[in-house]
Image: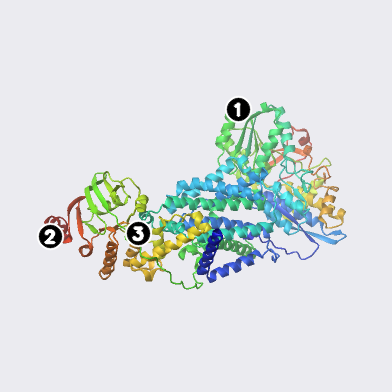
Amino acid sequence: MSAFATTGGAVRDAVHDMRRSWTATRWLAIGGVTLAALVPVRLPGSVRLDGLAETGYLALAAVGLGFAVGIGGMPSIAQGAFVGVGAICAAHLIGSGWAGPLAALVGAAAAALGGMAVGLAVVRFRAVYVAAATWIATWLFALALEAFPTLSGGSRGLVVPPRWSPTVHYELALALVMVAMLAHGALAHSSFGLTLRAAAQRPAAAAALGARAARLRLQAFAGAAAVGGLAGGFAVQLVGVADPSAYGPSLSFRLLVAVLVGGAATALGPTGGVVALGAISLVADVFGRVSGSETARFGPMLAALLLLGVLAFGGEGIVAAITRRIPSRARSSETAAAAASPTHGSVEARGLAKRFGGVVALDSFELDVPPGRIVALIGPNGSGKTTALRLLAGTLRPDAGAVRLDGADVTTEPTTRRVQRGLVRTIQSNAVFPDLTALENAIVGASLRRRYGGAVRALLATPKARREARAVRAGALDVLRTVGLSHRVYHVAESLTVTEQRLLMVASALATGPRVLLLDEPSAGSAASDLARLVDVLETLRENGLAVLVVEHNLRLVRTVAEEVVVLDAGRRLAAGSPDEIASDSAVRSAYLGRRGRR
Amino acid sequence: MFLAAGCGGDDSGSAHTLTIAVNAPFSKTPYVGETIARGVELGVAVAGPIDTKDGTVELRVKRLDNALSPRQAIANVRRAVADEAVAIVDEGTGVDGSWRIAGDAQIPICITYQGGMGLVDVEQRPNVFRIAPTDRGIAFRLAEYLIPKGLRVAILTDDSSYGDEGRAALEQSFGSNPEAVAIKLRLPADAPDLAPQVLRARRAGATALLVWARPTTIANVLTAARSRRWSIPIYTPPSGADPLVRQQLADQPRWVDGLTFASGRMTAELGPQAWQSFESLFVSRYGPDAIGVKTSEGLEVVQPPEYAMYAYDFVSVLAEGLRQAGTEDREALLAALNEVTVGGANGDERGFNLHNHEGVVDDDVYFARFEDMTFAPVKDDPLSSTLPAIKQTR
């Protein structure tokens, strides 16, 4: 009985979530899918269903590629190779008597393994190198197919006797594309997707929040490959042959072009791109016939022009440009979680030292930041402030000394582990995730602590995952309220003022649930009139019991909020004391203030 | 692009117009595609309207480019099925996968270029026919011709389907005389520089090269050998006669001299008259097929429409099948194709029966050698020595 009640509650929650997020676009999508499903009933005479089904499988591979490009920020030019892996694997298995669907699933698994192998090599690369490396991988695959004809079937390919009618393939392709698009949408808005998008936009800031970007990107890359392999595994059963020449760089490039033309960031974009390229092909055919010219040249030429146009207008893609113009329902106000209970923590540095070649960046550095206190770290440029912060946060390893968090030695622990323990830092540059909303920026911070926020649970939308997602969302709203950004929750970060962006960085850090907060120049770029907002926020954090270390150049802010000031000069601790003591310290005045005054 | 694959026109104006689809590599090897399509078009023009009990039938031709891709070739056959084609004249690529699709619609496929051994199988593939020399026939004739000369042959095949099929056929034909084979090498079809492979053959002690490959590869092998002053005799299947070989070597015409190829004979025992009348018909419709090279005397070289002849012959067989069946019904037509025989363009009889779907017998393979950019039958082979040289200049 209780199981029924639990299930009923979960279903009610799911329906409630769905109704909340329902929009006119979704009605349009359902209408479009229904019409597409009915195509075989009333097929125009000039259209062949097998061609449409093949287009459907191509769209499936493109949507899969959207996982890597749109969510993972990795412009892969290897998707055609993964389609080939799925197709060739399925062809061999079907030739050995396996059932078609099972063979396609194994093909997808083989492609996922291939994706893992390639992904391990490329996920840490910048986008341009990802493109270059995957392009090389595609060529290697094509060459391997030529070199091993027993594997690939050689120039004759591997023949797969057709078992299903084109109608079955068409409906299957349509269903798979829909599922893949839903998965794309679910992942893009999950913690998984938001963290990946954040890491693609500002890798250093995401890393500072403890995001395991490489691991998530690897999952996205392998997922994209798996979907490509699934498309290949089913498509080969439609076309009747695994033709090695069909899985070369040309297919990979065409898929990437389709994704970019349609728009990588939206679920519908890759499918829209495939349809757009198909329409171009038809237009080119007509144009060629009218002009009496060779039609084969017009298609790629028009596609290239369209791609250039899309990139020239910002690169968001056709679908995103259209859907942006469809009015969406105003968001209902959301409820923030109750304020989190005060969290107490402390951080200590003992004898920290760091050299970069012959330069001593930090030497014998000592620091104590107890709970509920704000300590300021000041010093002239190059004095070692940021190095100290990076050593404390774990993005640099010290040459000597120790870092203790609540008394525990964390010197050798990586950033992610320290963030999990409650030690988080904001970075010096203005590093919000510009394409995400303020709320999404905060959710990225909260993602590290999620237990049920992985890609699979996000895809399946399990009750636990949805419950946790709601809690994370409420927590994110709470930290935005804490920093005074409640009115900017749904604004994209790049539209915020500089001060608001700095506050949003603090909110993202707070969303990780820290006990010790390391802030690197939180007032940088802010107008003097906005300083009061920052002071309010810092004082609230102190009241909540956080240990806060602030690296700051703005001495007015330091005097206002800090109980203790540590002065660094040339990597050494010059002085420490209250702001008044530091202000009257002759050594500080001559070494720091005096030097500044001479400039 | 893929969406375009879903669209096919149906501009038939009459219920009695039947389509013959030509599935050939128009974009990748234009000579092969064009010559097949022209042979079919000429055959259709000559056949004219055909009376059946369903009414008068007119044939028309639809060209479908397979780009040498099995996937595209199969897609083309699907399109032909959707267009309710009466027959498919096929270069041979992708037939392993496409025969079943055409067979389900009772549409005959006739291969008029590739001679692969598994392509035609009366039992398994009852709708597949061929009018072209078989690889088996060419390979056995090559073995029969070369082994008695005491040559140590380097067998070079490229990794195209044409090359792979040839390799399989040569392995059978040279299998019982392994001492005649110096080395077997598989060449990358698109590699411009084949010097490493050719030099390897030289180091292996080869005294003849047997190159079963696409025309470009053959030209590249000739370049690699001759540019190193290696005057080894070179033998090829029919692809050696492709104009592309001579076009690629137009600035080194002497490198082509001595190149010997095996192919189906163009003239029959009855003499060259039948061939000449076909050739003049072909030339009057399309003009002479000038290949863009000249002899040392400055005469323009033209290509005889050899493979057009096979496509032309199939249309003749098809038209006769339609007449004999007396109906457009595909099943009846398939049955009729197993019973008809017609006079071919070169005077040979062309036809099929329930036990044989090969339109060219293996014994009809002859050898010809290039000299000054034109070829003539060799004199050291019994069959070839009886054949007249076909005029190839103007």
Task: Name the disc covering residue A32, or none.
Answer: none
Residue A94 vs residue B99, the one in the foreground: A94
Residue at horizontal 63%, vertical 43%?
A153
Q: What residue type is labelled 2?
A: Ser
Secondary structure at numbered mark 3: helix
Element type where label 2 sits in the image: helix
Q: Could you tell me which secondary element the residue under label 1 belongs to?
A: loop
Quadrant of the rendered structure where residue B157 is?
top right
Q: Which residue is the site of mark 1? A: B205
Residue B178 placement: quadrant: top right
For the question of whether residue A250 can be seen, the reply is: no
Find the distance from the CA under tag 3 to the CA under tag 2.
Answer: 34 Å
Q: Read off the residue under disc 2.
A: A584
Percent x, y of residue B250: 61, 44
Given this view, does label 2 or label 1 mark the residue nearer the observer? 2
* Residue A204 in which image quadrant: bottom left
Residue B362: horizontal and vertical position, in percent? 77, 38
Marks 3/1 same chain: no
Residue designated by label 3: A509
Camera-nearest residue between A318 and A284 = A318
CA distance for labels 3 and 1: 75 Å
